[in-house]
Image (cartoon, rainbow, N blue to C red):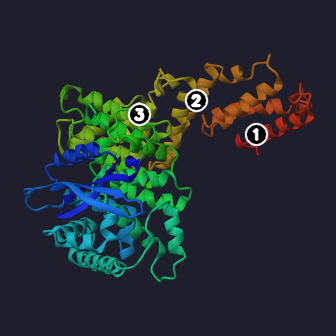
Amino acid sequence: MVAERESFEVQVSRGGRWATETVAYKEVEARALAKKFLADKKCEGARIVRNWLRGDGTMVESEIFKESRTVKDDGPVRIAQIDSVPPDKCEEPADFLGPSSRNVMNRLFRSYLDQVFLTPTELMHNFKELKRLQDKDNLVSSAVDRVAQLQTKDTDEDARGRSQDIFKNIDGIAARARRVEAMKLPKLEGRFSDVIAKINAMADTEDQDYLAMVVLSRDLVNVRNWLGKLERLCKLAVDDPDPKAVEMLDGVIADVLGSTVVQEILGWQPSLGAAICTMIDLADGKMPTAKSDAGESAEILNRLFAEGKLPISRGLLLDRAHRQISGPGPLNRTEPAKEMDEMKRVIARVLTPTGLICGSETAEALTMRYGRMVEQGGAAGRKAAVEGLFRIMPDRAAGLIYLCNLAATPTGTEQTAVITEMLELVFMARTISDLCGRTLPPKERMIRATHAHKAVGASPFPTATKARLQDFIDQVLERYLIDEQIIEKLDHPDSHLRDRAGRLVQFCAAGVLPEGKALTRARQRILALLRQPNFDAHFIDGFTDPVKAQKALRDFHHLLVRAGFG
């Protein structure tokens, strides 16, 4: 059939080069796509190449449409003025290929990368593209100077000397990319792990992982739009059973997620606060994809996050979310009166069952955001931010978790006095309802109090302060067990011994109580059951199958170990 013998390549010109964007199998579809690409003001041209498969197996190409135009130059491209870099410095060319370094490049060169649709990985593994960047205005020198300044700030190191070290490494990266430019490498036509295997079989002195990334970069460099790159990478990752291959793909997916494509993945959002929450949902693999503009790619990406296969990309998304939390943009631009509501919405999202999603990083970002919402400036504003943020937390246990995490940050060190004042408000809680949200189910109340107990233990508070706080939380939990007769409800005398013991041990093993008086009270009740005469015989009473009886007894003893009965 004709439909099986012809296809239409839709190509787009950017930077003076033609690259295939997509392939259609109907001419009307190809022309519609070409017009869509031309709607982009930055597009220099679009053309359609018809491919006809002849009977003898040869392919005939013919150009059936072409439109070119001059794109107005918007002037020199500048670096973004970033305010922070990772603490670890890159000392060797290979260090610059790591996720942290690529994340910094993504932020610094954002305007340029969005203009040419290239990731940092493609830049550093493709000599021609790296050379274009080096020749573009003074981008590289400005970026190096900025990084050197940030890395030597508050140190005795000279910024100029650090700049020279970075330039030396850039020369090494370029020399390596140029060395492999003409190397014949396998094409990426199936799984990425297949390419890795083929490269591993090659007798070459070059690092094999580096060559695999060269192959991936050669494949991606021809896809000149972010959604196209994301789709290619996601399909490679979801179909590859090799964890190493997926890990390498994860790093490049993170590169793409540093671009504007995130807005298309999230789809329309009513506010920045909503966008931040949805971005965190995506990082956790829980984002509703119905409103996404990324189609199947959003679904695959969500699945990969849910399966825990993209830790590097997850870290990048969370870093991006935190920078937006602490940034100057209003959480609700259209309705300023709802700014505080949006703030509470963000707090609810970053407060997970185990504490703040990224600990001290989250506490610092929230404090910076709240500091923009108070009238005072400087140290007084930061003090007001700590006080205000503690008071709008869902409950005092959540507020305590916040203070524990904040104490490990520069702001926390500066605001030790106000943190101490806020801790006194925690001690005013007399019942678990005062400490944890009244609307939380009983189990969730105990879990939140327990995680507050753990946060105190991990905090930089003085030993005496930590002991006082942990004893206080333990007393509140013990009183809750007594007042609500939690242990008695689990150990109902009318129930079978197996059920009574099982419920109590599961309760102790569930992590809902910290080590202390409350947990000891529950364990004592279990010990009383275990010390009954012929406990094992009574436990398996009712089983007719001896094999099942012994399995039930073994499972119970394993559970005992988990619950702290060694």
Q: Amino acid at mark 2?
A: Leu
Foreground pick, 233 / 271: 233
State the CA–CA distance, disc 1 to disc 2.
22 Å
What amino acid type should be assigned to the residue bearing mark 1? Leu
Q: Secondary structure at mark 1?
A: helix
Residue under numbered circle 2: 477
User: What residue is drawn where x is 69% and y is 19%?
Assistant: 489
19, 364: nearer the viewer? 19
Neighbour tally class for label 3: few under 14, some 14-19, many 20 plus, Cα within 10 Å: some
Q: Quadrant of residue 370?
A: top left
The mark nearer the N terminus, 3 or 2, is: 3
Rounded to the nearest whole Å, what is the CA distance between mark 1 and mark 3? 40 Å
Total tally of numbered discs in the picture: 3
- Amino acid type, residue under disc 3 in the picture: Pro
Expressed as whole percent of the image width and height from the top left, the position of residue 263 reads 28, 42
| Label of residue 288 in the image | 3
Instruction: Locate residue 534, reporting x and y percent.
Output: 92, 31
Mark 1 packing: few (<14 Cα in 10 Å), some, or many (20+)? many
Q: Earlier in the sequence, mark 1 or mark 3?
A: 3
Q: Is residue 239 left or right of residue 120?
A: right
Horizontal and vertical percent position of residue 169: 31, 77
Looking at the rendered image, the disc whose residue lies closer to the viewer, 1 or 3, is 3
Dot in front, 1 or 2: 1
Relative vertical location of residue 269 with respect to residue 405 in this rendering, above or below: above
The residue that mark 1 highlights is 560
Task: Classify 11 as above or below 36.
Answer: below
Q: Position of residue 393 (x, y in %)?
A: 37, 31
Disc nearest the viewer among 3 and 2: 3
Measure how far apart labels 3 and 2 are at the Cα level.
37 Å
- Looking at the rendered structure, the secondary structure element under dot 2 is helix
393 versus 113 height, above or below:
above
